[in-house]
Image (spheres, rainbow, N blue to C red):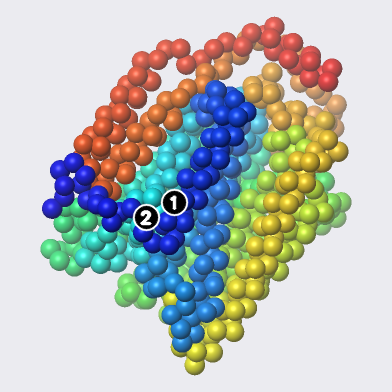
């Protein structure tokens, strides 16, 4: 029975494994080092006033990317531990016990999907979407801050088992039932996973609503839907998927929590439950989620190809239709994730056909990108390198996906490393390469100087070659019968050389990451030589390049009048400039309520994990109280006078 005050907390919850002790020590040392630096430089007030409480989407976008970078290194360590274990575990237990291996496997997937890939995309969207549509801010600035801090609180909670608990979920990243039920996972690891996804999922949902409303309602005059840049279209499609799919994830994980906490039996075989309902619900969210991760990358690649081919993207209308088609079809393919579970020939055939159909709009985009480069004056910048690398990986991964869309073929490779290789082709080759391309492309707009091109291209080659060396062996292992989540195997299978080869590929990827860190450090040191003084370092085509680098906090002194989807290019060709008829601007004030609400939400999630009823009530009351206080605050904006705007714009011209 739970303790009335401490719930399920006991001394055993304190760090006692080598990895939890090490992880806790690292986090404590890092926090102390940051606190000492801020104290020594007297920057606590600056950090709170200018960043943590900011409602400026550009600063929130930067914080998203910093947070995603930290989580990327966390997920990369997990990946390295998985590969090293599998390389050593032929007729051997390796260096990880089976339970620890499965925990790492689970954490790696959740961190990379929810906090790395989505974090980077939300960061870039916060920066670029308002600029591309000619807006000064998102529709709901406070909601933007709250969404970010809820995501951070979810990220903290998913790592908090290091400090209190000691064990994480060992179920795989989707917490598949019945493995995630109380009978097989009586610890708190699954609860940590559930409530971290609840918090971060709510943050993503708020962000999705915010971006959808912003794109629909805050476009510049003259910018119809068919005059929006393709990255904005891709963002809109991804937000539609988030708004429709994430409530399903929230409901599914909440039902799982009810199973675990109150013996509700939604997904257990006892008392009329059905685990197949969990599979259907989780993949009704899960497959749209895959496209939430890749559709923004498609939009980024469209912008990059057009800019560095120095011509408008071929087939703008067909590109929009392709994005919309992928969005629609992504709802009709979820059952291909369990072809082998007896759904029946008719259902399998329908979902197999739908899965094959979704390759058509993807192919349309590929051909349009290639045609855009055809007879264009292609500039092989490092951003274009990432695009060309994406094409090569996308072709291999896409063909593997079409193969698995056939139920008979899927029967052979389902749940094998073939599937893992295909999935990573999509997430690394499309989403992550898209993040690297987009970050390189917009870096001078965000920070005011270019990244080092030489090191950027070197990092690309490490990543591309490393990717193929790491994941092509997994396709072969899948055909040889190697299933995913294997922590050891018999040497007689002949698998070990392939696992070792994959680990060599991982080492090359790590060299790529090290090169990217070196690139960033060197670029900062040499930033005076690579300053973007024009605001348009790539001869860009869309409105974000019409502002200074970095843009002013109000983005545009005067909202532009738009006539086409490449408005800035049209302005340059016709030698038009922005109006200088300045008017007063209403701007949102900074607020700490996003931090406060998310802190109470974190306490609520932690309390539910450990059955601390009093702390859960405190967290819930804190959230509600902060929301009420915020709702009565009528001074959430201030007026930036036209005279001030004129002075700032004049000083920029003089500089």
Q: Earlier in the sequence, mark 2 or mark 1?
A: 2
Can the viewer see residue 69?
A: yes
Instruction: State whether residue 570 is above or below residue 273.
Output: above
Instruction: State whether residue 73 is above or below residue 354.
Output: above
Mark 2 neighbour density, 10 Å: few (under 14) some (14–19) many (20 or more): many
In front: 353, or 548? 548
Is 418 placed left or right of 318 in the picture?
A: left
Query: Where does label 2 land, which residue?
Result: 15
Disc 1 is placed on an element classified as helix
Q: How much space separates mark 2 and mark 1, taking CA atoms?
A: 7 Å
Q: Quadrant of residue 449?
A: top right
Residue at 40% across, 15% down: 633
Q: Are marks 2 and 1 in contact (CB under 8 Å)?
A: yes
**In x, y percent, where is residue 605?**
32, 43
Query: Where does label 1 land, which residue?
Result: 24
Is 338 placed left or right of 385 in the picture?
A: left
Can the viewer see residue 488?
A: no
Instruction: State whether residue 464 is above or below residue 568.
Output: below
Residue at 58% across, 42% down: 66
Instruction: State whether residue 588 is above or below residue 616.
Output: above
**In x, y percent, where is residue 541?**
76, 38
Disc 2 is placed on an element classified as loop
Residue at 34% across, 24% down: 626
In front: 408, or 461? 461
């Amino acid at each position: 029975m739970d303790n009335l005050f401490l719930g399920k907390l006991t001394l055993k919850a304190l760090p006692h494994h080598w990895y939890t002790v090490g992880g806790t020590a690292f986090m404590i040392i890092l926090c102390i080092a940051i606190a000492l630096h801020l104290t020594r430089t007297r920057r606590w007030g600056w950090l709170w006033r200018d960043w943590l409480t900011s409602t400026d989407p550009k600063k929130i976008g930067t914080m998203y990317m910093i947070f995603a970078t930290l989580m990327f290194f966390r997920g990369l360590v997990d990946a390295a531990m998985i590969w090293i274990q599998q390389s050593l575990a032929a007729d051997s237990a390796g260096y990880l016990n089976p339970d620890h291996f499965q925990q790492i496997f689970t954490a790696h997937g959740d961190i990379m999907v929810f906090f790395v890939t989505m974090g980077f995309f939300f960061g870039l969207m916060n920066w670029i979407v308002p600029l591309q549509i000619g807006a000064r801010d998102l529709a709901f600035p406070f909601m933007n801050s709250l969404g970010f801090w809820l995501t951070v609180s979810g990220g903290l909670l998913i790592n908090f088992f290091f400090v209190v608990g000691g064990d994480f979920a060992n179920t795989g990243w989707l917490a598949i039932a019945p493995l995630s039920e109380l009978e097989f996972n009586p610890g708190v690891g699954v609860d940590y996973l559930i409530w971290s996804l609840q918090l971060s999922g709510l943050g993503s949902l708020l962000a999705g609503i915010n971006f959808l409303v912003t794109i629909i309602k805050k476009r510049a005059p003259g910018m119809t839907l068919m005059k929006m840049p393709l990255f904005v279209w891709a963002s809109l499609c991804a937000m539609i998927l988030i708004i429709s799919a994430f409530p399903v994830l929230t409901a599914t994980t909440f039902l799982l929590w009810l199973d675990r906490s109150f013996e509700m039996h939604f997904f257990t075989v006892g008392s009329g439950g059905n685990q197949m309902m969990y599979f259907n619900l989780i993949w009704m969210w899960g497959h749209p989620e895959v496209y939430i991760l890749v559709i923004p990358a498609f939009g980024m690649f469209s912008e990059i190809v057009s800019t560095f081919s120095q011509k408008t993207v071929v087939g703008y209308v067909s590109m929009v239709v392709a994005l919309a088609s992928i969005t629609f079809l992504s709802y009709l393919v979820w059952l291909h994730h369990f072809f082998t579970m007896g759904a029946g020939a008719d259902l399998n055939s329908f979902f197999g056909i739908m899965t094959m159909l979704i390759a058509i709009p993807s192919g349309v985009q590929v051909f349009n990108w290639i045609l855009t480069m055809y007879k264009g004056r292609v500039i092989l910048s490092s951003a274009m390198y990432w695009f060309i690398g994406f094409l090569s990986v996308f072709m291999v991964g896409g063909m593997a996906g079409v193969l698995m869309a056939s139920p008979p073929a899927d029967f052979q490779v389902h749940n094998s490393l073939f599937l893992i290789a295909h999935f990573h082709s999509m997430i690394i080759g499309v989403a992550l390469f898209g993040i690297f391309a987009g970050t390189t492309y917009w870096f001078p707009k965000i920070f005011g100087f270019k990244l080092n091109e030489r090191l950027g291209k070197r990092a690309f080659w490490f990543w591309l070659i490393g990717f193929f060396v790491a994941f092509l062996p997994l396709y072969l292992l899948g055909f040889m019968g190697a299933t995913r989540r294997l922590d050891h195997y018999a040497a007689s299978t002949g698998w070990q050389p392939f696992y070792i080869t994959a680990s060599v590929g991982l080492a090359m990827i790590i060299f790529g990451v090290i090169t990217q860190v070196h690139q960033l450090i060197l670029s900062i040191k040499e930033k005076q030589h690579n300053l973007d003084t024009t605001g348009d370092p790539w001869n860009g085509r869309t409105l974000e390049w019409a502002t200074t680098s970095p843009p002013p906090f109000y983005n545009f002194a005067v909202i532009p009048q738009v006539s086409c989807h490449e408005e800035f290019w049209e302005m340059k060709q016709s030698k038009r400039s922005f109006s200088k008829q300045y008017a007063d601007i209403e701007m949102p004030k900074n607020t700490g309520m996003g931090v406060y609400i998310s802190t109470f939400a974190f306490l609520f999630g932690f309390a539910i994990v450990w059955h601390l009823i009093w702390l859960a009530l405190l967290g819930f009351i804190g959230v509600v109280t902060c929301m009420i206080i915020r709702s009565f605050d009528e001074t959430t904006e201030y007026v930036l006078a036209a005279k001030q705007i004129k002075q700032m714009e004049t000083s920029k011209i003089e500089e």
